[in-house]
Amino acid sequence: MNGRHDVVPFDLLSPTDRPYFELLGNGLVVVLPPQRPSAEGWGRGGPPHGGAWIHLGEDGRARAFTGKVEVGQGTRTALVLLLAEELRLPLASVALTMGDTDVCPWDMGTFGSRSMPDAGEHLRTTGAAARAFLLEIAARRLEVAVGDLDFNDGRVWVKGTGGSRSVGFGDLVRGLRRVEVVPTSARPVPPAEWTRAGRPTENLGGRDAVTGARQYTSDLHRPGMLYGKVLFPPSYGATLRHVDLARAEALPGVTAVRDGDFVAVAAPTLLAAHAALRSIRAEWEAPAQPSEREIVDFLRRHPAEGEEFWDVIHHEVGDVPRALAEAPVSLTATYTTAFIAHVPMETHAVVAEWSGERLTVWLGSQTPFRAREALADALGLDLAKVHVIVPPTGSGFGGKHAAELAVGAARLARAAGRPVRIAFSREEEFSQAYFRPMAVIDVRSGAAKDGEITAWQFHNLNAGSAAARLPYRVPNQKIDNQPAASPLPQGSYRALAAVANNFARESHVDELAAKFGADPVDYRLRQLEDDRLAAVLRAVAERARWVPREAPAPRPAAGARGRGIAVGVEKGGRVATYAEVAVAPDRRLTVVRLVTGFECGAIVHPTNLRAQVEGGTVLALGGALFEAIHFAQGRVLNPRLSEYRVPRFGDVPPIDVILLDRRDLPSQGGGEAPLLAVAPALANAIFDATGERLRSLPLTPSGSLP
Amino acid sequence: MTPDPGSRPRPRFQLRVNGVDHPLSLDPDRSLLLALREELGLTGTKYGCGEGECGACKVLIDGFAVRACRTPVGEAVGRSITTIEGLAQGDNLHPVQTAFLEAGAFQCGFCTPGMIVAAVSLLLRNPRPDDEEIRAAMEGNLCRCGGYLRILDAVHRAARASSGPSETTP
C-alpha cells in the first residue's frame, strides 16, 4: 500500500467499512471492534485497545492483524498458535501482520506484558467467532446442523460420513465479501482443551534469522536513500546558542536541517554524513547538572510530578506509626538501584520516505501508533498521512518507545526529497536514549516476637510503584512512591520499578528472617497470602534441594558458598528465584547456579516462555551484578560496551527453569516478572555466604564484593 | 581537520566474498563491515558496537572469525571472506545453522549471524569443544536476549551432528 496517496489507515475507519477485500481479496472478515481510551482511564473491559480482525480467504488461509509488535520476544508465534487453535489450522495456514499502522488495529504499545492478556485474548475471541461463522456457512452448504459437523486442518465434514461429505475453508468463503462483527457469544477454546496451543513449538521465521536474510530496520535500503546523522547536545539539557551549517551544506549531496535545537544532516554515504556532521560548528549552553556522587541527595531534594507511566501508589491499611512503635523488633534500611541502559543489540534505527504528502516510516519501535501520532503532530500532518511500519527489531526491553529519531528522519527526508535512514551508533545509543530510573527505597518494618511482620512502611523515590505491594499478610501497611526530577532522561524498561521494589522488599524480608533465626523459605511461606506464589516458591525450593536452616551463621568470607531465595508478583505472573554463589578469598563473586520458577496462567507457547524466563534471568543478572551508567555534568561517562559491562557467556551459570502451567487461569504475559527475584536472591545468597548485607545494585560493580 | 572523504584517493580492488569477486572502490582503511553492509548490500553481518566488543559483525576470513568492524577492508583483499549469507549451500543449511534452529538459540536474532560465524570458526579448529571451550571462544559475542545457554546447546548439537558419536566411543 506504500506510495498510494488515498490510503486511509484501517483504524481510522469504521470497523465494518474498511477496504478489507480490496486489500486481501474475497473472503470472510471477522472483526472485534476497538475500545478507545476513556477520559476516566482504563474502563471495565481492561485497557483501551483497537480490537482485532481476521480475514479468511479463498485460499483457505487465515490472515490476522494486531497492533502489537515483535521485537524478539516471540509473541508472533504465540499469537499464531492461539489462532491456529481456534481455527484448527496448521501454523503455516495462519499469517499475522503486526505493528503496521495502515492495516493493523490501533494499539497503545507493546509493553507491560500485555501481548498475551490483550492481543492474545482479542485474537482468540475473534478466531472463535470466525470458526462459528464458518461452521454456520458449512452447515447450510452441507444441509446439516452445526452439531453434525467436525473440522480440522481447513476442512469441514459431516460426522460419520468418513469425510465423503466435506468442504474446505476456501470453498466456504468463495465469492464472499462478508464482514461480521464478533458477537458476545464467541467462546474461545478453553486452555484445558487446547491441542495446538500449549505445546512445544519452534518460533516462526527462524530460517531467516540463521541465514542473515531477516531484514531489520537498520538493514533497509530504499532507492536513492541518504544516510542521516543528528547533532546531539554535548550534555543533557544543553540548548543551542549558535550553529553554522554553511560548511556542511556546501559538501556535495549533503542536506542539513535545523528546527529549534534539532540539527541533522543527510548525505549519500555514511562516511559523507559523518564528515558533514563534523563540519558543523555549534555552541551550546549547558546547564549545571548533578553528578553521580550526589545523586541520592539530589533526588531526595527534588520531588516531581508523576509522569505518564510512573503510576503513583498510595496504599495504606491499619495504623503503621502505632504498629511500628509497639513492635518488639523493628528494622530500618535504605536500598538503591542504579540508572541502567537497555543496550538492545540493534541500536535505534529508522527509515523515512515521502511520497507526495504521505510519509512512510520504518521504525524499530514498541509503540508504532504513538509514533504515528508524534510524527503527525511534529510535522503538522493529518494522522492518515503517516504510515509507520515496524520491521523485525533487534530487541527493545522497554527502550524503544520514543519517536524523536523518526521525526528527525522525516524532516531530513522532506528537506532532501529522498528517503533517509538514521541508525544510532552504540555511543549514541548509550548517551541519547533514556535509562531505567534509579531507585531510592526506604523501608521500615516492625515484627512480633515470633517473627510475624506487623508493620510495613515502604517508600520508593523516583523509580515507580510497580510490584511495590506486599504478597505477605501484614496488618499495618503504608506503601507509596514519589517521582523525582531526575537529571538523566529516564523511561520504561523491562519490569521497570518492579525489579527495584522487589529487591528492596525481598532483601528486607530476608533481613527480618535472619533477625529471628528463621529459615528464609519457611519464613516467607508462613506469611505469604498468595497461594499461587507459595506454590512457585515450594517448587523452586524443591528443585534447588533447599535445606531448611536457621539464621545465616557468621562464617569466614574466604571461599564461602551461599544460598538465597526471593519471590515476586508482577503483571499477573508469579516468580521465585534461587541463587547459589561462591565468594573467593579475594572477594570475587561467582554465581554457581540459578533456579527460576514461574507461573503466568495457561501457557500458550512453552518453548518460547522458557526462553523468555531464561533470557529475563540473564538480563536481570546484569542489573543485579554490574550494570551502572556513570555520569557527571549531564554526560554519560561510560557510553561504550568496553566500559559498560553486560552479561557475557562467562557470567551465565546453569539456569534451571520451572514452568507451572495453570490451564484453569487466563494467560498472562511472561516478559517481565521473571526478572524480579534475581537481584534479591543473589543479595540474600551473598549474605548467607559472608554475613554481609548489600543494599545497593549493582552488587559487585567490579566483579568483587565491595 | 578530517578531509572530506570524497577527496580521498579511492583505489579500486576486488573483494572475494562468499566465493564471488566484487569490484569495490573504497578507502582501504575503512572497515570491512562498512564495505559488506553499505557497498555490497550484505546486511546479514550486523553493526553492534563498532569497537569489537559485541561480535555481531563477525565474518570468516580464510576460515577464522574476525570482527568486521575492526578489520580494515584493505586487509581482507586477496583473502576469502565468508559471511552469514555464504554458509548455506543452496537450500541446505550449514550444520551450525540447523543446530541453532533446533535449539531455538535466538530470540530477536540480531546477534545470531555473529554467533553462528563464531561457532563455525570454533568447530573448524575444535570439532568437539566442551562448555568451557565454547564459552571462552564466544566470550566476545553478546546476546542481550540472554540466550547463552541455548547457544551453548546449539554449538554442542552442531558438534555432534558434524563429527558423529563414534569419535568418543572406545
Image (cartoon, coloured by chain):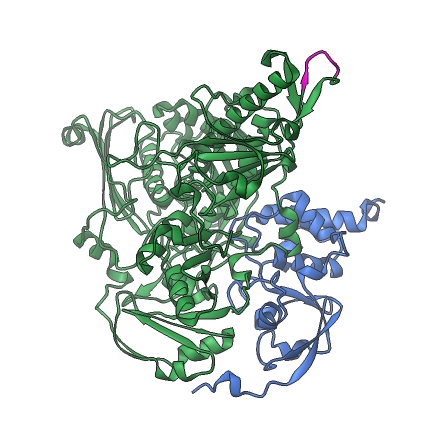
Chain colours: A green, B blue
Q: Residue at x 50, y 27 (%)?
A: A602
- B124 sits to left or right of A298: right
Does the magenta run of residues contain A72?
A: no
View extreme (front): residue = A175
Q: Quadrant of the C terminus of chain A?
A: bottom left
Point out residue B149 in the picture as x, y percentages from the top left corner: 59, 46
Q: Is residue A275 above or below residue B157?
A: below
Locate residue A486, reporting x and y percent: 25, 56
Residue situated in front as seen by the camera: A383 or A261: A383
Q: Is residue A280 above or below residue A28?
A: below
Q: Nearer the viewer, residue A6 or B153?
A: A6
Q: Is residue B9 above or below residue A79?
A: below
| Magenta-tinted stretch | A157-162
Residue A459 lies in quadrant: top left
Number of callouts = 0
Image location (x, y in percent) of residue A265: 41, 73
Residue A160 among magenta residues: yes
| Helix, strand or loop: magenta stretch | loop
Q: Nearer the viewer, residue B105 or A646?
A: B105
